[in-house]
Amino acid sequence: MNKTGFIVHGRRSIVNRFNKQFDRFGKLLEGEYNVVLTSESGHAKALARELANDSYTHVVGVGGDGTLHEVTNGVMLSDNTNCIVGLLPFGTANDYAKSIGSKNELIDLINKINKGETKRVNLGRVSLASGKVEYFINIADLGLGVDVVQRVDRSGKLLGSSLTFSKAIIQSFLTYKNQYISVKADNWTWEGKINSFIVASGKYFGSGMCIAPDANFYADEFSIVIIGDVTLRDYIRYLGQIKRGKRIDHPAVQYKRAGVLTIDSKFGIEADGEFIGLEPTTIKLT
């Protein structure tokens, strides 16, 4: 019998939206269920671990990419890694949902749970030199994106997700200095100054920017996008192509593939919009 846990981001607008749909469709869900709300950063991760360890068959994150990231990591830390992770994309950016085609209707999710419909997708594993391990479901990157994520976290998203990220990117470009990294992949190496080094399972990040048009959640390798020593002028020039999901034709931009990467840098790394750490890193497809 199914046992489904809904972990709902505590923002009032998300809670109200979920309650409205659950009042209408919740009775159609087969098996047991439980609904819990998050109250702070990291809470969804702890709740997901607890539910998975309590033999829940499904744990659903109700929110955005950050909520899904926490739920995924909570389940992976549990003793029940066969627990199925789901998403009801009620967040602001919903980049993962854009990439995989998730609908934001509870009735669609309930139908899939009742029918046992699932999809097995790739998961990225980030291992820091200190021993810390974090999983990501969409995109991890080094460079400018780390500064952007930290700016967004400090400012919030009162301007809306798209405008907030665009403002943060411009502000970061004005102060950010491209730095040197060294990368060793399965069958290639790369070193030099970068603006961004992107390891992607999904196509979208930064609130709808299609940065990795070749990415595929079901592929046997990550899609790698290396954006070298570029400027703010370059970014503005190619922004339209990025939003349309077109490859950038620029001598400082390269597209590669890899299943395992070891990265030596002084950059921080972020994954799914969450800051992970500052240390040398190994990233592996799982």
Image: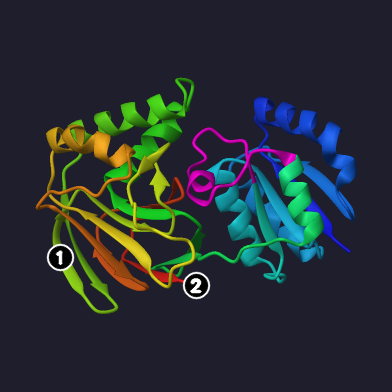
The N terminus sits in image quarter? bottom right
Name which residue lies at 32% across and 26% down.
167
Instruction: Choose between 11 and 88: the one closer to the eye.
Output: 88
**Residue 164 visible in image:** yes
Res 148 → quadrant: top left
Q: Rounded to the nearest whole Å, what is the CA distance between mark 2 and mark 1? A: 25 Å
In the image, which residues are magenta? 88-106
Instruction: Choose between 240 and 91: the one closer to the eye.
Output: 240
The residue type indicated by label 2 comes to Thr
| Label annotation for residue 191 | 1
Q: Position of residue 226 (x, y in %)?
A: 22, 56
Q: Position of residue 227 (x, y in %)?
A: 20, 51
Q: Is residue 184 left or right of residue 134?
A: left
Residue at numbered disc 2: 286
Q: Position of residue 247 (x, y in %)?
A: 24, 49
Name which residue lies at 69% across and 38% down.
105
Q: Residues within 10 Å of mark 2 (few under 14, many from 20)?
A: few
Mark 1: secondary structure: strand
Mark 2: secondary structure: loop
Instruction: Choose between 43 and 69: the one closer to the eye.
Output: 69
Q: Is residue 62 left or right of residue 193?
A: right
